Image: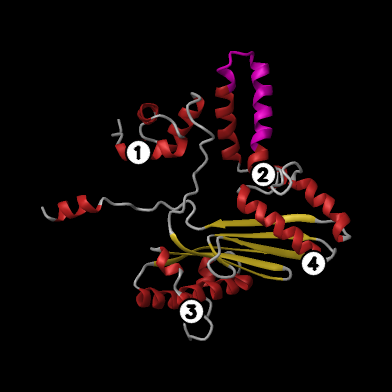
Amino acid sequence: MAEISAALVKELREKTGAGMMDCKKALTETSGDMEAAVDWLRKKGLAAAAKKSGRVAAEGLVGVVAAPTAGACVEVNAETDFVARNETFQNFVAKVTELALTTGDDVGTLQSQPFPGTGRTVAEELTHLVATIGENMTIRRAARLSVTQGIVSTYMHSSLVPNLGKIGVLVALESAGDQAKLQELGKQIAMHIAAARPEALDVADVDPSKLNRERDVLAEQARASGKPEEIVQKMVEGRVRKYYEEVVLLEQVFVVDGETKIRKVVENAAKTVGAPVALTGFVRFALGEGIEKTTSDFAAEVASMAG
């Protein structure tokens, strides 16, 4: 039996909003498995939606850049927010993001590229920056989107300087229509993505393992109503459709008007831009999302060092 620490109980409470004793029981029942405990609480009706909180768990910057038919997004992490305000660090992130326009998603390939004006590679320049500033830094991830005809639009939320900040978004729109009007549409959809945090473009793109897990939780919740199995299955399918509306971009309701699905927004845009429009891809990078940040009790650390 795994030892259930107070820290583990606290983490589960923050994830689910459930009571302390319920969290402790859930962890005990699941041998300390955090994700299984989240599901246990949800099946008992003791947790909210239990999505990952997405709290910033690392510092640094996200960068975005776009050419007419391509765009790139890069996340570079550092240890403190202080570094994000350093002009040298900002310049590094901006130039690496520009390089990603041609290199694409592979961080290894990106790091092997010559860094402009230094005679060093990107990886060597990063090492130099670490030595100069005195903090550990990493290029965590990169993404590139392109279209054959149309635009890739960018949006930066909580920007420190233009194109550098905490949440970067790319939106790819294929269309032969008016470029300026496409950019306006792309910017609005990118702002929606920053706020709504979709996980997939279309229903077909939803992670099967996540969908199966969701179905399992929804089925347990529905069976708790005591209704016949055929009714339970209909309840599950209805709730799955609701799940799609939460995580699938084209099924989400547009935050700008609060009533039209993104799929319909894109379809209706053909009248405005003068040609059919297809939303072919998106990227959303939130700084530090999914990274576990190590925390320490400074007083306890000092006491331990004192013997």
Indicate which disc, 2 or 3, sits on the residue closer to the N terminus. 3
Q: Quadrant of the N terminus?
A: top left
Q: Nearer the viewer, mark 3 or mark 1?
A: 1
Mark 3 against mark 4, which lies toward the viewer?
4
Q: Earlier in the sequence, mark 4 or mark 2?
A: 4
Is residue 223 on the magenta stretch? yes
Q: Residue at x 45, y 70 (%)?
A: 85
- Gap between marks 2 and 1 measured at Cα: 31 Å
The outermost residue toward the front is: 257
Q: Out of 37 and 24, give the one closest to the viewer.
A: 24
> Of marks 3 and 4, which one's residue comes earlier in the chain?
3
Residue density around tag 2, few if under 14, some if 14–19, many if 20 or more, within 10 Å: many
Task: Please give the label number shown on residue 55.
Answer: none
Rendered residue at 60%/56% (across/down): 284
In the image, farthest residue toward the left: 307
Report the disc number at residue 8: 1
- Apparent side of residue 50 relative to residue 211 in the rendered image (left or right): left
Q: Which residues are magenta?
A: 222-243
**CA distance separating discs 3 and 4:** 37 Å
Between marks 2 and 3 in the image, the one whose residue lies nearer the viewer: 2
Residue 90 at x, y percent in the picture: 50, 73
The location of residue 102, given as percent across then percent down, is 63, 73
- Whether 244 is drawn above or below 149: the answer is above
Q: Main secondary structure of the magenta part?
A: helix
**Which disc number belongs to residue 248?**
2
Camera-near label (4 vs 2) is 4
Residue type marked 2? Val
Residue on which disc 4 sits:
180
Label 2: which secondary element: loop
**Residue that numbered label 3 is attached to:** 121
Q: Secondary structure at mark 3?
A: loop
